[in-house]
């Protein structure tokens, strides 16, 4: 079978814009070229060029007319899926990875939840092995260094102040695979922990916080660069006490995570974030828990029990929203069809922006020659029809 694949005729979203009737060339695990298709929108490459003709003869031509071709999605905040958690065994983690790949997420960061420090250290070691194997892109520690006032679905009994020594303990346990730590930076040790993370090339994310506007500005100046699921688990925007939301939206150094599932955010809040931050500073995330791709029922999120009903996850005790059951293909479709955002902006928020933040944009996040052949095919209604990861079909569009 030919190792060269030519996907021809789709609307291809490139960093420079959308190409109608475009062509993407994949050889082995990499993208090797892209261009408009041949005359009259033919799915067959233009054969007037001798080199192109030779390439076509030795390639598998895949007709993808009537589809959108976009980069594989990059999820930088994900706790699990398919009935399994990134806080469990290695097989649990791989189940979650496979589940989200079926929905277009070809690059995923594994997020932990608040637990005993020794357990988190053990999870860091396990997940670092999966990162070394290329199954995940790194580790995100959400908790235990968060505010009890804004704990959300985290066990209050296990929360602690962000002591830089303990933050360093988690980083070391991750063996260079820690990508992000979410902290309530107003707590004792918060600013020193932000500086420590910045020094070690780990993203300091402000979240589950009760910080004031001024405290948030101080954390950004110390090196914080991400807002963990903006609006959620933080004080609301006020006209006299603007709190963290205003500081996070106005500062160009901050990328804001948004959960576009119709539950976590009112559409007006999402539009507010896009308007003030701009498309280049938004990263769509799932914040998914075990139930993503698995259906309603009872689950555990860390040590806490969660009830999922009609796709919404809430703690059994207290009723707090407990992550989501979102997949990024659903986020894409909602962002375009409900929120009416431009496709190019949605692609940036789902792929290019998180890839850049994670420092993996040399390999993933856009459809450019030399990068991994990670891509998603969507039909005219933005329903997922195909997923390719490193040149291999995860969801083959030719199988219907």
Image (spheres, rainbow, N blue to C red):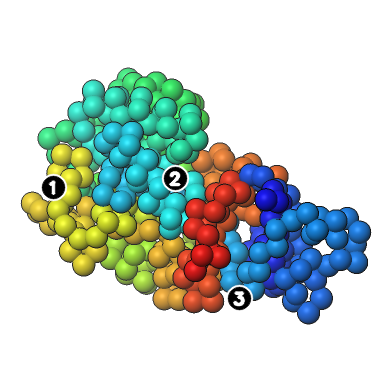
Comparing labels 3 and 2, the label whose residue is closer to the camera: 3
Residue 332 locus on image (x, y percent): 46, 65
Counting residues from the start of the chain, the first of labels 1 and 2 encountered is 2
- Report the side of 40 relative to 391 (left or right): right
Q: Which residue is mark 3?
A: 66
Query: Which one is in front, 152 or 84?
Result: 84
Quadrant housing residue 66: bottom right
Judge by depth and name the residue closer to the eye, 219 or 47.
Answer: 47
Q: Secondary structure at mark 3?
A: loop
Q: Gap between marks 1 and 2, in whole Å? A: 24 Å
- Res 188 visible: no
Q: Is 192 situated above or below 38?
A: above
Sort mark 1 into few (<14), some (14-19) or many (20+) by Cα contacts within 10 Å.
Answer: some
Whole-angstrom CA distance, mark 3 to mark 2, is 28 Å
Q: Quadrant of residue 375?
A: bottom right
Residue at figure coordinates x 67%, y 45% from the top left: 28
Q: CA distance from mark 3 to mark 1?
A: 44 Å
The residue that mark 2 highlights is 108
Which numbered dot is residue 305? 1
Question: In this image, 266 relative to 366: left or right?
Answer: left
On the image, the x and y values in percent for residue 164 come to 34, 24
Label 1 secondary element: strand
Q: Residues within 10 Å of mark 3 (few under 14, many from 20)?
A: some
- Which of 191 and 382 lies nearest the eye of the viewer? 382
Badge 2: how crowded within 10 Å, few (<14), some, or many (20+)? Answer: many
């Amino acid at each position: 079978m030919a190792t060269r694949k030519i996907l021809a005729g789709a609307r291809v979203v490139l960093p420079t814009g959308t190409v109608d009737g475009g062509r993407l060339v994949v050889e082995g695990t990499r993208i090797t070229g892209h261009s408009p298709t041949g005359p009259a929108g033919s799915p067959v490459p233009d054969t007037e060029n001798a080199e192109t003709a030779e390439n076509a003869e030795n390639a598998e031509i895949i007709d993808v007319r009537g589809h959108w071709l976009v980069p594989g999605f990059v999820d930088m905040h994900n706790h699990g899926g398919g009935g399994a958690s990134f806080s469990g065994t290695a097989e649990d983690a791989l189940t979650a990875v496979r589940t989200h790949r079926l929905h277009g997420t070809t690059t995923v960061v594994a997020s932990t939840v608040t637990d005993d420090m020794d357990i988190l250290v053990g999870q860091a070691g396990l997940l670092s092995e999966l990162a070394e194997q290329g199954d995940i892109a790194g580790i995100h520690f959400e908790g235990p260094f968060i505010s009890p006032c804004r704990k959300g679905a985290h066990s209050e009994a296990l929360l602690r102040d962000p002591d830089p020594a303990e933050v360093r303990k988690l980083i070391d346990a991750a063996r260079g695979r820690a990508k992000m730590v979410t902290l309530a930076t107003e707590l004792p040790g918060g600013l020193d922990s932000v500086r420590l993370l910045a020094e070690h090339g780990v993203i300091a994310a402000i979240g589950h916080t009760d910080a004031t506007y001024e405290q948030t500005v101080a954390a950004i100046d110390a090196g914080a660069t991400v807002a963990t699921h903006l609006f959620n688990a933080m004080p609301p925007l006020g006209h006299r006490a603007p709190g963290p939301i205003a500081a996070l939206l106005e500062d160009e150094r901050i990328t804001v995570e948004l959960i576009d599932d119709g539950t976590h955010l009112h559409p007006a809040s999402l539009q507010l974030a896009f308007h003030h931050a701009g498309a280049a500073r938004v990263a769509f995330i799932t914040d998914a828990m075990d139930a993503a791709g698995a259906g309603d029922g009872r689950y555990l999120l860390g040590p806490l029990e969660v009830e999922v009903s009609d796709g919404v996850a809430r703690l059994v005790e207290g009723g707090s929203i407990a992550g989501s059951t979102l997949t990024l293909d659903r986020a894409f479709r909602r962002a375009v069809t409900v929120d009416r955002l431009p496709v190019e902006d949605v692609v940036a928020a789902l792929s290019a922006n998180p890839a850049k933040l994670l420092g993996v944009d040399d390999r993933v996040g856009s459809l450019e020659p030399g990068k991994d052949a990670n891509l998603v095919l969507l039909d005219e209604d933005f329903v997922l029809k195909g997923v390719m990861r490193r040149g291999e079909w995860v969801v083959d569009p030719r199988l219907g």
